[in-house]
Image (tube, rainbow, N blue to C red):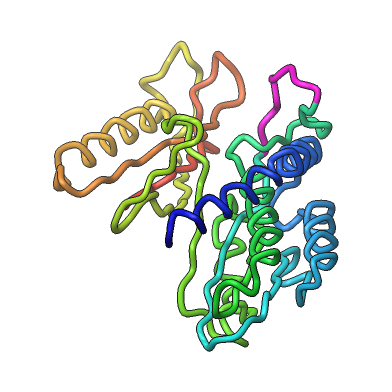
Amino acid sequence: MDERKGKEILNLARNLQSQLIAWRREFHQYPELGFQEFKTSEKVFHVLKDLGLKVQKDVAGTGVVALLENDGTKTIALRADMDALPVKEENDVPYRSLYEGIMHACGHDGHTAILLGAAVLLSQMKNTFPGNVKFIFQPAEEVEEGGAIAMIRAGVLEAPHVDGIVGLHLFNDFRSGSIGVTRGTVTAAVDNFTVDLIGRGGHAARPQEAVDSIAIAVQVINAIQSMISRETDAQDPKVITIGEIMGGTAPNVVAASGVPHKWNYVWK
């Protein structure tokens, strides 16, 4: 790309800045959990429809897909996720979440606004490049076995066939205005699994007569962390996070059972 064209694109992008900020803050105020992005997807659908694009909504539940048709046989896809997290917002800003216990704590409000901006900009530049562009707004990125595989099964990578796909993720580690690019894996994949540890209940004053499932859980947790640090290749990034632990019925009773642990196994 020559310098003149680069400056033209930059100027078009800057003209969209205030609109992107407004979209992002609107999405932030009305966060929705995975496969519940009804208000978000409706907003996305209408913006894309107003651009004159071919738009499908309710894809894999709440997903939205738009197609910018152009001369040429190749198709590139641009993808953003739309769902929020079950997190209570504590920020004191005018556009804070209006839904108690739900917020965009992972930047998907920004991703959605950025992809809408890309759709506007590329629609304005349609006659300057060959090929088609698909805009994929994915639901339920934060949900295990969520929106990505569901949208693929719904056929979003076909008709026309997608030759390449690009996504991005906001990252607090980078200075504002900078972009990071690398080869290979950028972020980790995740598998979740649950373990129930079953012991035998008893009085806390006589633990020798019981089998303490909470004490067992502590040993299991420590052993798992040692397995990651001592049984796997240090050059192969892995992490296991224990995100939730519950057990017991009273402070003076040895917990017999009901100690489910939600483990989060992540690898690159």
Q: Residue 131 at x, y = what percent?
A: 55, 80
219 w.r.t. 162: above or below: above
Q: Residue furthest top?
A: 205
Magenta-tinted stretch: 86-94
Which quadrant would residue 61 be assigned to in this image?
A: bottom right
Q: Is residue 89 magenta?
A: yes
Taking the spot 59% from the left edge, 78% from the top edge, the residue there is 132
In front: 120, or 85?
A: 120
Q: Is residue 58 magenta?
A: no
Q: Residue 184 at x, y = what percent?
A: 29, 58
Taking the spot 69% from the left edge, 41% from the top edge, the residue there is 17
Q: Residue 37 at x, y = what percent?
A: 76, 54
Q: Is residue 123 left or right of residue 149?
A: right
Which quadrant would residue 242 be assigned to in this image?
A: top left
Q: Is residue 118 left or right of residue 260?
A: right
Which quadrant would residue 252 be assigned to in this image?
A: top right
Question: For the stretch drawn in magenta, what is the main secondary structure?
Answer: loop
Q: How many labels sit on residues?
A: 0
Taking the spot 76% from the left edge, 73% from the top edge, the residue there is 53
Picture quarter with the N terminus: bottom left
Taking the spot 59% from the left edge, 53% from the top edge, the residue there is 143
Q: Residue 237 at x, y = what percent?
A: 25, 46
